[in-house]
Amino acid sequence: MFKWIAAFFGYFIFRFPGAIVGYLVGTLLDGQMGSGRNGQSVFQDMTRQSVSPADFELNLLSLCSIVIKADGHVSQSEMDYVRQYFVSTYGKEKANAIFRTFNDINKKREISAQHICTYLNQRTRYEVRLQLLHFLFGIAQADGVVRNSEIIKIQEIARYLRVTGADFESIKAMFIKSADNAYKILEIQKTATDNEVKKAYRTMAKKYHPDRVNTENEAIKKGAEEKFKKVQKAYETIQKERGLS
């Protein structure tokens, strides 16, 4: 599968010579994917069956590349963040093969985020796309600061992924501190009543509760637990600020 995808991208960027190189690289990657550890993306078991692991990972790598290059330079810490994800998911040998493809993608011309997101929208559930945004913010924060150019690019991707503005701001607030950070995480205004705060907390706690994640994949569970803890902390902050019981 990878050989045909790589050939297509190669032809799109470098025409016929690129298609040949892409086919050869893809053939090698297909061989790597068929042997060794039987890894699976932390997102893959939450996607619809119409998207293959190879297709999904290639598009995920492309989104990673877009975010990494958003601030005008490639950060080693951000690259390492992506590498760590693939090593923990696939094992070192298979991850290295996939990462070589990632490096090829990262060196080519700008990839269409809209095209990728349209593909993913047709083949993934909304919960997966929320997890993707969380992962992309994690990449942006890997070098210690989330820059405005990265926020703009991730927000653009969020729109293409049809993620609501409220959900985007909630996930963003989990990575970027502000005066009304806790309220943003709960998806409410600072002027919300105490009852509205409590209702919002129950809604968000239910939305991000680890038990709601129907998977045995430990990486996905860990991500859900992290979001749930952020929601709890946000509510506790507002409780303390307002003296709520």
Image: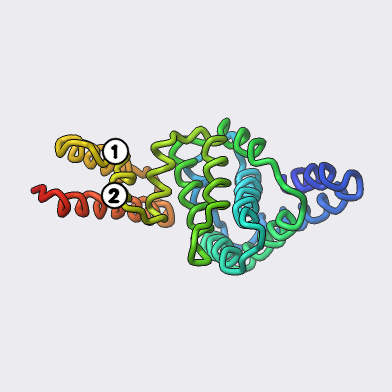
Checking the image for residue 173, the label placed there is none
Q: Residue furthest left?
A: 245
Q: Residue at x 31, y 48 (%)?
A: 180
Q: Using the image, determine if residue 6 lies above or below residue 94.
A: above
Q: Residue placed at 76% from the left, 58% from the top?
A: 28
At x 41%, y 47%, the residue is 171
Q: Is residue 45 left or right of residue 119?
A: left
**Element type where label 2 sits in the image:** helix
Q: Position of residue 42 (x, y in %)?
A: 49, 52
Kind of residue at badge 2: Ala
- Circle 1: is it few (<14), some (14-19), or many (20+) Cα within 10 Å? some
Residue 193 in which image quadrant: top left
Give the answer, above or below, for where 81 lies relative to 153: below
Figure quadrant of the N terminus: top right
Percent of width and height locating residue 173: 38, 50
As drawn, is 10 to the left or to the right of 63? right
- Residue with the mark numbered 2: 182
Q: Residue at x 40, y 56 (%)?
A: 218
The residue singled out by tag 1 in the image is 188
Query: Mark 1: which amino acid?
Result: Ile
Instruction: Left or right? Give the position of 49 relative to 243.
Output: right
Q: CA distance from mark 1 to mark 2?
A: 9 Å
Residue found farthest to the right: 17
Question: Image check: 211 left or right of 78?
Answer: left
Viewer-nearest residue: 154 or 98: 154
The residue carrying pointer 2 sits among few (fewer than 14), some (14 to 19) or many (20 or more) residues within 10 Å by Cα, namely: many
